[in-house]
Amino acid sequence: MSENAAAPKKQARNNGAVVMMCLSFVFGMGAMSYAAVPLYRIFCQVTGYNGTTQRVDQVSSVVLDRTMRVTFDANVAPGLQWDFKPVEREVNPKIGETIKVNFTAENRSNETQRGQAVFNVTPGEAGVYFNKVQCFCFTETDLKPGEKLEMPVVFYIDPDIVKAVESKDIHTVTLSYTFYPKEGPKPVASNAGGAVKIEKKL
């Protein structure tokens, strides 16, 4: 076989190798993008980055003789016809004191709607010290037409907030929620949006 005849075959093999490399790169980038979301979420939960609060299973054993003003913000994204708001606009618990507050959500539409609340704390430096024992945001919430639900949040501020240089001068934090619509089969009855009874005595 002459060199001129072998050249097209060699070029084809080279082109095939380039295509395979490009496809591998695309699939690899797709896999990395898919993994980036849960990895970013874990990073935020561990570090409190971007005001991400912490989820804990037990209350604080230390309570300081200093209060922290905690204000609440409630929002609803387009797609949910809900009236969502805190029962109290602010509280002033002692740092380390476990406290329960309530939010209410009412479905103003004529159909069952499902929502999921996302949250953050400002200033962002306080997020790692804001510990939630119970929250309606841990699960999705289903509301039937006209249904109104009271949903608790049980939390405390970690006493270590007064030790860190970046957070020791914080006196007010804001806990903000936004409910987003969630797709999925609508249940026959509401599951109470995860607003379970609090078994722990506070």
Image (cartoon, rainbow, N blue to C red):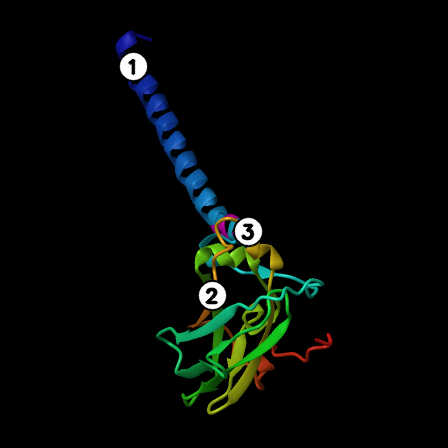
Span shown in magenta: 37-41
- The picture places residue 21, in percent across and down from the top left corner, at 40, 30
What amino acid is at disc 2?
Answer: Val
Q: Residue furthest left?
A: 4
**Is residue 79 located in the magenta-colored stretch of the structure?**
no
For disc 2, the marked residue is 173
Residue located at (53% from left, 67% from top): 68
In this rendering, which labeled residue sits more in front, label 1 or label 2? 2
Mark toward the viewer: 3 or 2: 2
Amino acid, disc 1 = Ala
Q: Is residue 3 left or right of residue 27?
A: left
Counting residues from the N terminus, which is met first, the one under dot 1 or under dot 3? 1
Can residue 38 be found in the magenta stretch? yes
Percent position (x, y) of residue 134?
Answer: 62, 71
Judge whether 88 appears above or below 11 on screen.
below
Is 143 positioned to the left or the right of 57 in the image? left
Please, what is the three-letter code of the amino acid marked with disc 3? Ile
Depicted 101 relative to depicted 25: above or below: below
| Dominant secondary structure of the residues highlighted in magenta in the image | helix
Which residue, given by chain and number where applicable, does mark 3 sit on?
42
Gap between marks 3 and 2 measured at Cα: 22 Å
**Residue 153, located in which quarter of the rendered image?**
bottom right
Residue at 69% from the left image edge and 78% from the top image edge = 198
Residue identifier under label 1? 7
Quadrant housing the N terminus? top left
Q: Earlier in the sequence, mark 3 or mark 2?
A: 3
- Identify the image quadrant of residue 45: bottom right
Residue at 47 percent across and 90 percent down: it is: 145
The foreground one among 24 and 200 is 200
Q: Single out the mark in the foreground, 1 or 3.
A: 3
